[in-house]
Image: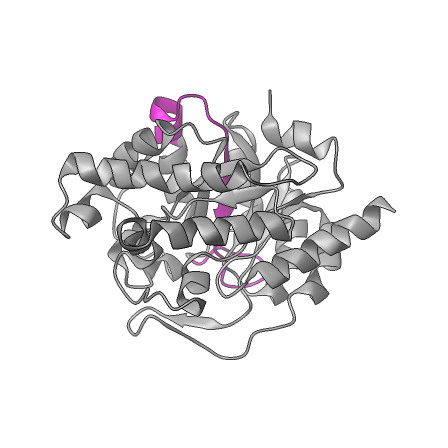
């Protein structure tokens, strides 16, 4: 059964959670590190679970694991064994599941295992460019073990997110087929303007190509400036009838060298109605969003029920 299709039969749209890394930072945990939020998996896992609980309490139906920047190689560089590194990645999903067990929303809470792009592992901001110089086969090899490890935790979904280039999305999907244990996935791209991924792919073409992959149950956009999102939704809708997932950032710009955000964020809730009307049926937040933003999204959904 398509878990997303089944849930959407009950609700106008699904509410996703918001930022993990920048929310940890807002709560006093230092994420200026190559492991980013994944560092908290061994230093402060209870804080991660607390963030998940707050997002579910705000109205989220889906919680996304703190595995965006988690890799075996990254944990090994901190002195963990391969087995310990694998367990930390599994822990990321377990923390969402534990938080979901306490949730009381109208839908059964879902745990999505985050799979960040190769650029997240590089920790240099290249997920906002996609200029890796890697072949599809090399990218598939990079994602293979991560997918198998996260699948062993039995998440409800995979969140293949912040992907800057179509080739990487296809590489991840190949490995989902091989090692994903039949767990469905959404695929979301980071975009540089109202029509293209950060690497310059037309999002209509991305949606059209991914539309034919049965393991992909939603396609969309994340960690992208809110101003571009309604246009991107409409463009993607030209290539697919699958659900569209969107969870933009607040419009600030990330500096990969200093690992800091610059600029002024927008009033996030002002956009949600437009995104839903444009065709988005999974809506949440990415970097710099908070439980307050997710609460506003859930409030808009509640208004549609009346």
- The residue under the point 31% across, 29% down is 148
The answer to if 264 sits in the magenta stretch is: no
**Number of numbered markers:** 0
- The residue under the point 50% across, 72% down is 252
- For the N terminus, the quadrant is top right
Q: Position of residue 218 (x, y in %)?
A: 57, 37
Q: Position of residue 186 (x, y in %)?
A: 52, 38
> Which residue is more in the foreground, 1 or 290?
290
View extreme (right): residue: 306
Left or right of residue 57: residue 175? left
> Which residue is more in the foreground, 16 or 291?
291
Q: Position of residue 55 (x, y in %)?
A: 56, 52
Q: Is residue 162 visible?
A: no
- The residue under the point 37% across, 57% down is 127
> Which residue is more in the foreground, 11 or 122?
11
Q: Position of residue 14 (x, y in %)?
A: 66, 42
- Extent of the magenta region: 174-198
The answer to if 189 sits in the magenta stretch is: yes
Q: Is residue 113 above or below residue 124?
A: above
- The residue under the point 38% across, 69% down is 28
Q: Is residue 299 above or below residue 210?
A: below
How is the model colour-coded?
one colour
View extreme (bottom): residue: 263
Instruction: Classify residue 173 by image quadrant.
Output: top left
Q: Is residue 82 visible?
A: yes
């Amino acid at each position: 059964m398509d878990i997303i299709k089944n849930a959407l039969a009950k609700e106008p749209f699904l509410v996703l959670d918001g930022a993990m890394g920048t929310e940890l930072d807002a709560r006093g945990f230092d994420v200026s590190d190559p492991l980013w939020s994944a560092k908290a998996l061994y230093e402060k896992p209870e804080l991660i679970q607390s963030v998940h609980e707050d997002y579910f309490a705000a109205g989220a139906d889906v919680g996304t694991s703190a595995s965006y920047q988690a890799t075996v190689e990254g944990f090994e560089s901190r002195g963990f064994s391969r087995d310990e590194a694998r367990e930390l990645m599994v822990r990321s999903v377990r923390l969402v599941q534990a938080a979901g067990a306490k949730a009381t929303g109208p839908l059964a809470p879902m745990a999505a295992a985050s799979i960040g792009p190769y650029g997240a592992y590089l920790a240099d901001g290249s997920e906002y460019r996609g200029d890796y110089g890697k072949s599809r086969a090399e990218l598939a090899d990079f994602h293979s073990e991560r997918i198998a490890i996260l699948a062993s935790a039995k998440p409800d979904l995979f969140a293949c997110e912040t992907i800057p280039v179509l080739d990487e999305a296809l590489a991840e999907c190949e490995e989902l087929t091989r090692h994903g244990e039949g767990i469905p996935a959404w695929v979301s791209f980071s975009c540089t303007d109202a029509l293209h991924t950060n690497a310059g792919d037309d999002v209509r073409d991305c949606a059209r190509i991914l539309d034919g992959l049965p393991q992909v149950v939603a396609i969309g956009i994340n960690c992208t400036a809110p101003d571009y999102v309604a246009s991107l939704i409409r463009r993607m809708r030209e290539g697919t009838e699958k659900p569209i997932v969107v969870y933009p950032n607040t419009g600030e710009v990330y500096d990969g060298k200093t690992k800091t955000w610059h600029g002024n964020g927008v009033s996030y809730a002002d956009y949600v109605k437009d995104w839903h009307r444009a065709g988005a049926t999974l809506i949440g937040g990415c970097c710099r969003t908070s439980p307050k933003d997710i609460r506003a999204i859930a409030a808009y959904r509640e208004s549609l029920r009346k």
